[in-house]
Image (cartoon, rainbow, N blue to C red):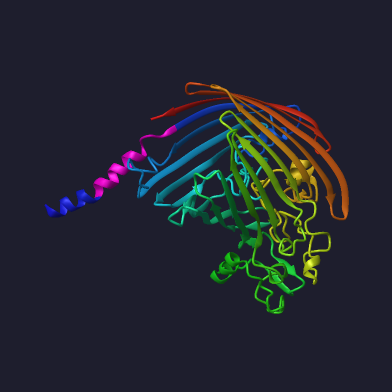
């Protein structure tokens, strides 16, 4: 009898919580069509869509999703609840020039106090930026399908002082890239750390922090001979000691003995660091007025050490946004043309190191992409996105060919009770690659109208590209989404 009572006491909370996970869910089902005059959809119809919208147009898309958010972050007496769980599933299928079915979100998350753990694919944007109107955060913009990963985080700014003057948030994650034509079964290491100075009710608050991404491990699809270290490379180091080097970012050449020890480490890593390291250092200022809230932000780029010596300090993303109850405006300027100069990252004079070649890497030949899409800003595009002949070219289709650009982007949203209007315009100019200068210019624009009535959402988007990248192309999106809650 006592044993049965004990079992009942143990399983009752589990059954109760399981029932709660099946309640208060949000469901969506949608149908869309994407039409274009060219071989590919215009830039702003398929960018920053988490990999759901294909490059190729003239498709019909179906979508279904279910999400269970945390029942409540705070209790009735405004105390933080101890535990909560949630999950999300989202499936998208395309039929037309391309036929595919993707599970674009599939995650389980749990929260205890200020900490959160999640596993699976989940939509995220990383970096200090206006997440709703930005052209895309430089390092993690929502342009590609989310990588599967496990992550421990403090997702919200959490005070560490009693007066709430200083608050922190951050993440620590391990992800899986899978395999490409060049590298098989390689990983992502990712961490972020951000601090906010200023109490929540203050009119002015200052933010600063950084993010760190590393592509590491795995093995080349075809073993190769590394002439500088005189050894055959059939796999890239992935033991625990390498993981510590990945996390810390320590140089493997601190003793100036790169390549002297034949340990299976290719010269590109032995001379530098384990894996492909990249990220941004961010600062932002939030200022509230009687008109609305202004946000000024700056993301500075680092890859091969140029930022430490300020060689590429002119590169980065600069933005100013404004939001009020009905109006939101964002203006951004992205510059990636310096890359520390054209003298090469291996220069013995640190102050002359350059040619960072953003998002590209000689070992991870598909660069900072996932399933053919750039993980960072969509303005740095793979070769196949710029050329219809990419697949037959000797250039890797995923190689970030024009990664030296300047871009001016402006975005505006206006809300009425049932209608939202959203307009974007971007000017992109590339001087070409170092040693192969070729100036290209392009204009991309879009207008979107979203009408909501009850549980029904209707959307019409029109977009166009004019210039050297894609000559001229136009496209349209029509969508209808049904939202339900149970």
Q: x, y (%) of residue 263?
A: 65, 75
Which of the pair 11/293 is nearer the observer?
A: 293
Whether residue 238 is visible here, answered yes or no, is no
- For the point 46% across and 50% down, the residue is 118
Q: Is residue 476 above or below residue 298?
A: above
146 sits left or right of 253 in the view: left
Q: x, y (%) of residue 437?
A: 88, 50
Q: x, y (%) of residue 254?
A: 68, 76
276 sits left or right of 228 in the view: left
Name the quarter where the C terminus is drawn.
top left
Whether residue 481 is visible here, answered yes or no, is yes
Q: Is residue 65 above or below residue 197?
A: above
- For the point 58% across and 28% down, the residue is 326
Which of the pair 265/270 is nearer the observer?
A: 270
- For the point 70% across and 48% down, the residue is 317
Magenta segment range?
Answer: 11-26
Q: x, y (%) of residue 386?
A: 78, 41
The question of residue 21 being in magenta is answered with: yes
Number of disc labels: 0
- For the point 79% across and 67% down, the residue is 351
């Amino acid at each position: 009898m006592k044993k049965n009572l004990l079992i009942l006491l143990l399983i009752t909370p589990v059954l109760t919580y399981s029932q709660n996970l099946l309640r208060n869910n949000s469901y969506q089902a949608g149908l869309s069509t994407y039409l274009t005059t060219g071989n590919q959809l215009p830039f702003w119809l398929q960018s920053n869509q988490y990999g759901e919208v294909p490059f190729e147009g003239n498709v019909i898309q179906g979508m279904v999703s279910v999400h269970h958010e945390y029942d409540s972050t705070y209790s009735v007496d405004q105390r933080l609840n101890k535990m909560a769980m949630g999950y999300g599933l989202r499936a998208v299928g395309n039929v037309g020039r391309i036929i595919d079915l993707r599970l674009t979100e599939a995650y389980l998350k749990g929260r205890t106090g200020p900490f959160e753990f999640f596993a699976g694919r989940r939509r995220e944007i990383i970096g200090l930026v206006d997440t709703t109107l930005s052209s895309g955060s430089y390092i993690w913009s929502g342009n590609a399908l989310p990588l599967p990963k496990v992550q421990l985080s403090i997702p919200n700014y959490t005070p560490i002082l009693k007066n709430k003057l200083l608050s922190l948030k951050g993440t620590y994650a391990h992800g899986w890239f899978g395999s490409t034509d060049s590298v098989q079964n390689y990983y992502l290491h990712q961490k972020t750390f951000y601090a906010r100075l200023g109490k929540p009710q203050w009119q002015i608050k200052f933010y600063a922090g950084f993010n760190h991404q590393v592509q590491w491990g795995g093995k080349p699809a075809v073993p190769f001979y590394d002439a500088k270290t005189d050894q055959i490379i059939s796999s890239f180091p992935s033991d625990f000691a390498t993981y510590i080097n990945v996390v810390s970012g320590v140089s493997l050449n601190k003793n100036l003995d790169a390549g002297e020890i034949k340990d299976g480490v290719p010269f590109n890593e032995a001379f530098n660091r384990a894996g492909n390291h990249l990220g941004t250092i961010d600062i932002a200022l939030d200022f509230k007025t009687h008109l609305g809230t202004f946000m000024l932000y700056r993301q500075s780029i680092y890859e091969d050490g140029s930022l430490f010596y300020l060689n590429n300090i002119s590169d980065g993303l600069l933005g100013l946004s404004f939001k009020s109850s009905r109006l939101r405006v964002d203006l951004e300027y992205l510059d990636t043309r310096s890359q520390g100069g054209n003298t090469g990252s291996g220069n013995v004079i640190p102050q002359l190191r350059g040619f960072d070649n953003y998002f590209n890497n000689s070992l991870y030949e598909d660069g900072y992409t996932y399933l053919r899409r750039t993980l960072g800003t969509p303005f740095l595009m793979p070769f196949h996105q710029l050329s219809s002949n990419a697949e037959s070219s000797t250039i890797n289709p995923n190689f970030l060919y024009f990664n030296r650009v300047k871009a001016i982007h402006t975005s505006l949203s206006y809300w009425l009770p049932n209608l939202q209007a959203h307009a974007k315009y971007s000017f992109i100019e590339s001087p070409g690659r170092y040693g192969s200068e070729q100036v290209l210019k392009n204009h991309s624009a879009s207008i979107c109208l979203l009408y909501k009535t009850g549980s029904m959402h209707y959307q019409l988007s029109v977009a166009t590209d004019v210039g050297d990248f894609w000559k001229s192309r136009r496209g349209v999106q029509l969508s209808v989404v049904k939202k339900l809650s149970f």
